[in-house]
Every structure is written in C-alpha cells, then in structure tokens.
Image (spheres, rainbow, N blue to C red):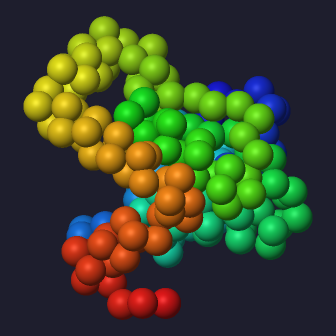
Amino acid sequence: MCLFQKDRVGRIILAGGVAPSGISESRAMADLFCGLNPNLETSSEVLLLDEKSLDTAGNMEEALKIMDLYGLGNEAVLLTFWLHLRRSLRLGENFGIKFIGQYLSDQIVSSLDAASRASVMRYRRSPRAAARFIHELFLTALLPIDPTARIPRELTKRIRGASKD
C-alpha cells in the first residue's frame, strides 16, 4: 500500500480465491487496504481482485490475465510472505511476469509496532512455519519438471473440492 501511496504503482492486484469462510482472500485484503487508506474504495479500479485462483500458480495465471485485461504489460512488484517468495518469483517468471521489485509482507507487518514484530517472530519459530518451509521447498523443487505447477494445482483442486475449469 505504501508503494501505491508514494505513486510508485498505479494498480494493485490482490490474488486469492474463496476461502472456507466464503469471503475471498483478495476481498479480505481489499477491505484491509481500504481500512488503512480511507481515500481508496474497494470498487475502484486501483484494486484489481483475482477471486478465482486456489493456489500460487493460479494467482500468477489470473494476475497475468488481469494485467492483460487492463493493458498493464507484464511487469509487476511482488508482495508475499517470506516462506513463499522463492516459489512465487519462479512461478511468476514461468507464467511470463517480470518482477521489477519484491517486498515481504512479514517485514512490513514487523515495522508496524513491537507487538506485530513479536507476532511475526513467534510464527517464524513455530512448528507450523517449519512444516510450511518444508512444504515450500518441496513445491519449489518440483518446478524444473513442472514449471506451471500442474501437479500441485491438481492436488489443491482435489483437496479443496473444486471442480475443473
């Protein structure tokens, strides 16, 4: 959001499909951004939402479609969680997105206040983060033989009960 406020980016693509709660991850992020910036409306063309994707490969594929639809070219700035950065960069490149910058969401959250920083550090040391790290390593290791992540995408669809498009 600070990139948008400093006029470094003109549009923000928020990627993430519908969660079990029924609200898409991208809609939840849009609501958060609008709460942090009262001059921004969720219906504006500044926040572009991908509410279809179920996984990282889907995020990249849908983001590229949105970029094409709005004539934004293929350059983007990536904002993601530290565990997710390497695979996100590779997948984006595999789908044709050229990242001209990258930011870590947990660093941004940590800069807010001491309580937020402590929360991020607790998570980074947790067994859940360790398991997620192994998960990310495995999925990243698959990319040379599965560059668009077809295998994990199919598993995600089956696990989440989504039908094929």
Q: Is residue 108 left or right of residue 37?
A: left
> Which residue is at 39% across, 17% downward?
110
Q: Is residue 37 left or right of residue 120?
A: right
Nearer to me, 65 or 2: 65
Please provide percent x and percent y for residue 44.
70, 61
Please provide percent x and percent y for residue 124.
25, 23
Instruction: Say if 23 sits above or below 134 in the image.
Output: below
The N terminus - image quarter: top right
Nearer to me, 63 or 133: 133
Instruction: Say if 80 sits above or below 103 in the image.
Output: below
Exactly how many numbered labels are in the figure? 0
Q: Is residue 118 left or right of residue 49?
A: left
Instruction: Say if 153 sits above or below 127 in the image.
Output: below
Q: Residue furthest top?
A: 114
> Which residue is at 67% across, 61% downward?
95
Viewer can see residue 42: no
Please provide percent x and percent y for residue 160.
25, 75
Which quarter of the picture shows residue 14? bottom right
> Which residue is at 59% across, 46% downward?
90
Q: Is residue 119 left or right of residue 5?
A: left
Nearer to me, 29 or 165: 165
Nearer to me, 51 or 134: 134
> Which residue is at 62% across, 67% downward?
61
